[in-house]
Image: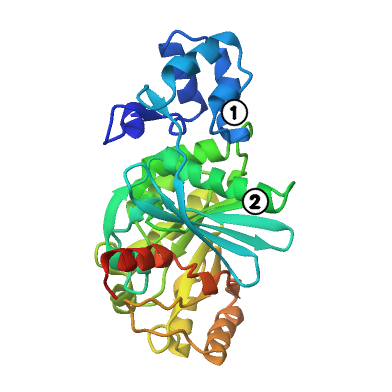
Amino acid sequence: MRACLWAVSLSSQRSLHDPDFAGLREILAADGVNPCHALALWGALHREGSLDLSSQRFAPPLRRWVERSVGEGKAFFLDAPELVEEIRSDDGLTRKFLLRLRDGQTIETVLMGYARRHTVCVSTQAGCAMGCVFCATGQRGFTRHLRPGEIVAQVLHARRVLHEIAPGRRIRNLVLMGMGEPLHNYESVMEALSSISDPGGISIGPSRIAISTVGLVPAILRLAEEKRPYNLAVSLHGSTQEERAALVPVAKRWPLDELIAACREYGTITGKRIFFEWTLIAGKNDSPGTAARLADLLSGIDAHLNLIPLNPTGGYSGVESDGGTGRQFQQILLTAGIPCTFRQRRGIDVAAGCGMLRGEKVRVGSGRG
């Protein structure tokens, strides 16, 4: 399993950011190095975020291993995506990064600042196969899954930037709400989160990590069965099968009733609250009747509903609901006893909706639009 996760399609090299701590020990042991040295190597990679292991003061056995094993043309490399573009919001609180991976694919990562905390939003795939009609990433289709190291490297990049602009500040929260469907890339995502939440490394606690899914029922049930400690966010967007399927094509494979049943089972097994996400689209899913049906749908589930204003994209003609309609929608849910808040908006002026910056670059590079 590990070898599969670490494989690099373009070469025989493997990333040192792919394995978790146990995997790193295995690598050293297999090369004849005492695995006790894994702690120093892990700390350099994840706690310090070093991109130059040759400068580290390692013990001689580990130093010699690094010299012969890590670097161009050697067995291992470090994931260090190239920054293609960084754009900042007018309020200075949001920075969006377009990052280029080793094979030339580009992904997006967003660093968001709030009062006394910072959150990083990462991608889990290059593109997305789910095809949600209002999502810029979904409009461009799926290219490939990201490896664990490519997910970890986004957090490390954001942390380096944060240290530069706000020394002493830490990334407090992680959300897997960027490009891609995290549960479609289940193995790599879980391996990456194991590394990211490790107390000896980046150390973002599991309770501060949220996995957002558009509703892959088997994977939701697997999360529950494996008792994964992360928070679950489900993108719902429709209160009937017809309403949801018009916006979220994956609903045709896993209908709304199956999704809600899986959410109920998840809550029963884990005892955890589920965060439901609802993008408000004028005339599509923002009516009082829709809100009432949604309240009935979520009845009995320990749920919190996040209302999200629609991010405009060139590939979708829908528009966001006006403020009055949104507030009425919220009030119906609150009256029914469903906690319901508007997600604090970040980075709309820097195209912070997933896939939007990448889409702009693709259009510019291809000469279209």
Local SS, label 2: helix
| Label 1: few (<14), some (14–19) or many (≥20) C-alpha neighbours in 10 Å | some
Horizontal and vertical percent position of residue 133: 32, 73
User: Which residue is located at x 29 percent, y 49 percent?
Assistant: 144
Local SS, label 1: helix
Task: Name the one closer to the observer, 124 or 92.
Answer: 92
Q: Which mark is residue 162?
A: 2
Q: In which quarter of the image is the N terminus?
A: top left
Task: Name the one closer to the observer, 127 or 218.
Answer: 127
Horizontal and vertical percent position of residue 69: 42, 18
Q: What residue type is labelled 1?
A: Ala
- Residue 195 visible: yes
Disc 2/disc 1 C-alpha distance (Å): 18 Å
User: Above or below — where is 40 with respect to 351?
Assistant: above
User: Above or below — where is 222 with respect to 282?
Assistant: above
- Residue 226 visible: no
Horizontal and vertical percent position of residue 61: 54, 9
Q: Which mark is residue 44?
A: 1
User: Which residue is located at x 47 percent, y 73 percent?
Assistant: 278
Q: Is residue 287 left or right of residue 93?
A: left
Q: Are marks 2 and 1 in contact (CB under 8 Å)?
A: no
| Label 2: few (<14), some (14–19) or many (≥20) C-alpha neighbours in 10 Å | many
User: Above or below — where is 121 with respect to 202?
Assistant: below
Task: Name the one closer to the observer, 32 or 208.
Answer: 32
Task: Name the one closer to the observer, 234 or 292.
Answer: 234
Query: Sequence-wise, which precedes: disc 2 or disc 1?
Result: 1
Q: Quadrant of the C terminus?
A: bottom left
Q: In this view, does 154 lie to the left or right of 58?
A: left
Horizontal and vertical percent position of residue 302: 55, 63
